[in-house]
Amino acid sequence: MIATASGSSFRLLCLIGFLAFVSYDLIRSPLLPLFAERLGARPEGIGLIMGVSTITGILLKLPAGTLSDLLGRRRLLLIGLSVFALAPYFYFGVHQVWQLILLRTFHGLATALFAPVAMAVVVDLFREGRGEALSWYSSFTQAGRLSGRMIGGYLLVWFGFQQTFVVCAVIGVVLIALFLMLKLPEDRSKTAVPRLPAGRRHESFPALLQGLREVGRDRRVLVTSGMEAILMTASGALMAFLPLYGINVGLHAGEVGLLFGMMGIASILAKPVMGRLSDRIGRRPLIMTGQIICAAVMIFLPWTDGLVGLLLLSLIFGFGEAVIGSSTSAMVADLCKEKSLGSAMGVFGTIMDIGHASGPILTGFLIGLLGYTGAFSGIGLLLLAVTVLFASSI
């Protein structure tokens, strides 16, 4: 990992990010679609349940990132981590589909507030080598997501739904304790993260709009964020329906968790290397290459029904995600102004979440119409089509 004067803060932030997403994805997949199915939800309903938490991110990631430019990173991070800690307790009282939809909307606040601000902190810490630094951080959070899914699958097999919720709640308490130990750039320097003084907070809204306008006018930022969004459409489709597809072809929940764990292994190994490579050769070639890899996996997936074949495709998809993710966020950071970093990460996160929310919802309807083969293959063809558009516009 990168060794600098900010190294200890960065390592602790990576650990917090890892555990935050372990906690979040312990519940998210494969547990959530199976839990929703147990409550009586149909494929369209399962897609909505899986996507609704991300809709919260669509609405809040952008203002959260921008507000962190104005009010400081620490308080936004703390609010987000508090939701990580509190939300698991409410799952014990869920007995109907509508209750689960409401709870998932609330739980989505956690990533909506934490994710863009944490990425802005990474950029604050590293003025050089951002691609590598962001890739290391993203590798830890992605590994947390996929490790959570793998661990959650086996917890579900061995203990059941309720005990998995308990583990998630315990991790939330640990997160708060670790955050209290974290030193941010704004803790050490009055100029590292510019903020408005208390007497001028009334100026926050106009400043927020100005930051959003600066970022929103840059077509390159929007197009690059859109590539990440399309990738997240595919990722969201797998998150929601790979568990159900795996069960249908004879796997158990623990083996489905292994599929996500394989994606995590690929991400851990590939992202830092790809981030360093993107710093040297540029972001664009890696974004296109990763998108093609992920498209191929989505097309071949519904023709594969054995554990070994699905593990191999999961490994390849995780590598493809790493290739893309090593470059998209770094490219957005390269393109934006320093004072609008939080806004840029908020825009990036919002557009990404539009794709992530669309994936489960769109795939749920496609499965109802075309089955798994048509749905997964259709998402793969969409990835290829958008890659052609990206190549012609950036």
Image (spheres, rainbow, N blue to C red):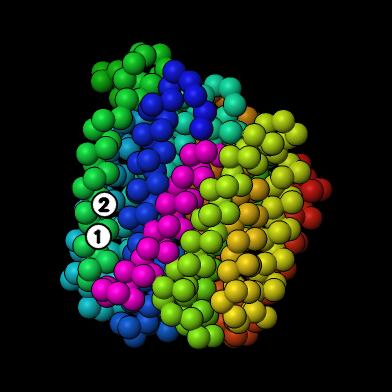
Report x, y in % for residue 364: 52, 77
**Element under disc 1:** helix
- On the image, the x and y values in percent for residue 78 come to 27, 38
Classify residue 257 by image quadrant.
bottom left
Answer whether residue 281 is magenta in the image.
Answer: no
Residue that appears at 67% across and 67% down = 297
The amino acid sitting under disc 2 is Ile
How crowded pointer 2 is (Cα within 10 Å; few <14, some 14-19, many 20+) is rated as some
204 or 89: which is nearer to us?
89
Q: Are marks 2 and 1 in contact (CB under 8 Å)?
A: yes
Q: Is residue 158 magenta?
A: yes
Q: Which residue is denoted by mark 2 in the rendering?
A: 171
Q: Please determine whether, in this image, residue 117 is positioned above or below residue 295.
A: above
Of 306 and 53, the residue lying toward us: 306
Q: Secondary structure at mark 2?
A: helix
The residue at 52%/67% (across/down) is: 259
Give the CA distance from mark 2 to mark 1: 6 Å
Whether residue 218 can be seen here: no
In the rendered image, which quarter is residue 52 located in? bottom left
State the image coordinates of residue 383 (x, y, percent, origin top left).
Answer: 69, 61
Prevailing SS of the magenta stretch = helix
Q: Circle 1 sits on which residue?
A: 167
Q: Which residues are magenta?
A: 135-161
Q: Type of residue at label 1?
A: Val
Label 1, residues with CA under 10 Å away: few <14, some 14-19, many ≥20: some
Q: Could you tell me which residue is drawn at 46 percent across and 74 percent down?
A: 255
Q: Residue at x 21, y 62 (%)?
A: 166
Residue 373 tag number: none
The quadrant the C terminus occupies is: top right
